[in-house]
Image (cartoon, rainbow, N blue to C red):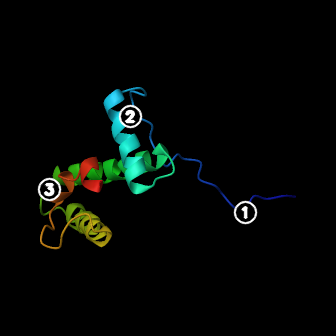
Amino acid sequence: MVTCAHHRNYRLTFSTPRRPYERERLDQELRICGEYGLRNKREIWRVQLVLAKIRKAARELLTLEETDPRRIFQGAAIIRRMTRLGLISEEDKKLDSILELSQYYIE
């Protein structure tokens, strides 16, 4: 009897743009690929998806009360992760500063 010991995650790690042929976005993505030496636009979309997920989590935590234990614990974890990645500074340790991040900041 054969058993499958390894499970694979088949979820996509990127999200394609809603409008596939928008000239302004295409030009900007091409410029970013050339400037940073990316192999393809999928790498840009991957960073945008990760940033969108982090911002969504911060928005959901900001709707909770400040004394809520979930907001305190998960908020500290998100802030610690962002400072470790170097996206927010040591002085700016607030959930509001995570919402100010945009795809242009990654550039």
**Residue closer to the observer: 90 or 95:** 90
**Mark with earlier residue (2, 1):** 1
Q: Amino acid at mark 1?
A: Ala
Q: Residues within 10 Å of mark 1 (few under 14, many from 20)?
A: few
Residue at 21 percent of width and 49 percent of height: 59
Q: CA distance from mark 2 to mark 1?
A: 42 Å
Q: CA distance from mark 3 to mark 2?
A: 30 Å
Q: Amino acid at mark 3?
A: Asp
Residue at 59 percent of width and 53 percent of height: 9
- On the image, numbered disc 1 is attached to which residue? 5
> Do the numbered discs 3 and 1 sit on residues whose CB atoms are within 8 Å?
no
Residue 49 visible from this viewpoint: no
Residue at 30 percent of width and 72 percent of height: 84
**Mark with earlier residue (3, 1):** 1
In the image, residue 28 above or below residue 13: above
Q: Quadrant of the N terminus?
A: bottom right
Q: Residues within 10 Å of mark 3 (few under 14, many from 20)?
A: few
Secondary structure found at label 1: loop
Where is residue 32? Give x, y as percent: 37, 48
**Residue closer to the observer: 95 or 73:** 95
Please name which of the two marks, 3 or 2, marks the residue nearer to the observer.
2
The image quarter in which residue 25 lies: top left
Q: Is residue 76 left or right of residue 12?
A: left
Residue at 38 percent of width and 41 percent of height: 29
Secondary structure found at label 3: helix
Q: Is residue 58 left or right of residue 11?
A: left
- On the image, numbered disc 3 is attached to which residue? 96
In the image, residue 102 above or below residue 4: above
- On the image, numbered disc 2 is attached to which residue? 26
Where is residue 23? Give x, y as percent: 35, 28
Q: Quadrant of the C terminus?
A: bottom left
